[in-house]
């Protein structure tokens, strides 16, 4: 169970990193052509975008604002809390 919680936490961090990098690229705060930025962005896009695309099918962007990352972060957090509540003391064995 702790492995699942760890994976959910890592995925949550990946979503946050994906959002921050996209903001920085769109604001021209970082060079989108730099090899490190290209590699990190491609990796994060590969693991985050499939889930975000499914959420966007249900909740499309509103007035240019994409709420799918926020919905995903809330969903991951709720899932973590649910798993902790269901597992209870078994997590600490």
Image: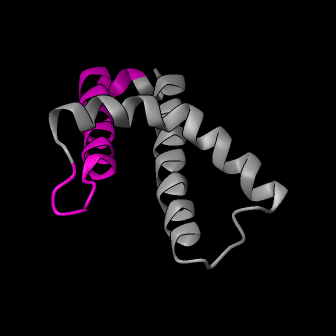
Q: Nearer the viewer, residue 77 or 16?
A: 16
Q: Residue at x 50, y 26 (%)?
A: 2
Q: Residue at x 56, y 40 (%)?
A: 45
**Quadrant of residue 55 in the image?**
top left
Q: Is residue 93 above or below residue 80?
A: above
Q: How many marks?
A: 0
**Magenta-drawn stretch contains 75:** yes
Q: Nearer the viewer, residue 71 or 3?
A: 71
Residue 81: horizontal and vertical position, in percent?
27, 37
Drawn side of residue 52 relative to residue 62, left or right: right
Q: What range is drawn magenta here?
A: 61-90
Q: Is residue 82 above or below residue 27?
A: above
Q: Quadrant of the N terminus?
A: top left
Residue 76: horizontal and vertical position, in percent?
33, 38
Furthest-right residue in this view? 35
Q: Residue at x 52, y 60 (%)?
A: 22
Q: Residue at x 58, y 33 (%)?
A: 46
Q: Magenta part mainly helix, strand or loop?
A: helix
């Amino acid at each position: 169970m702790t492995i699942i919680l760890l994976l959910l936490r890592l995925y949550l961090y990946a979503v946050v990193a994906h959002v921050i990098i996209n903001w920085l690229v769109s604001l021209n705060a970082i060079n989108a052509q730099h090899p490190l930025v290209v590699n990190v962005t491609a990796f994060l896009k590969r693991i985050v975008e499939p889930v975000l695309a499914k959420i966007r099918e249900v909740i499309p962007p509103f007035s240019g604002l994409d709420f799918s990352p926020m919905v995903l972060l809330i969903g991951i957090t709720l899932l973590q809390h649910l798993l902790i509540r269901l597992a209870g003391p078994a997590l600490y064995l």
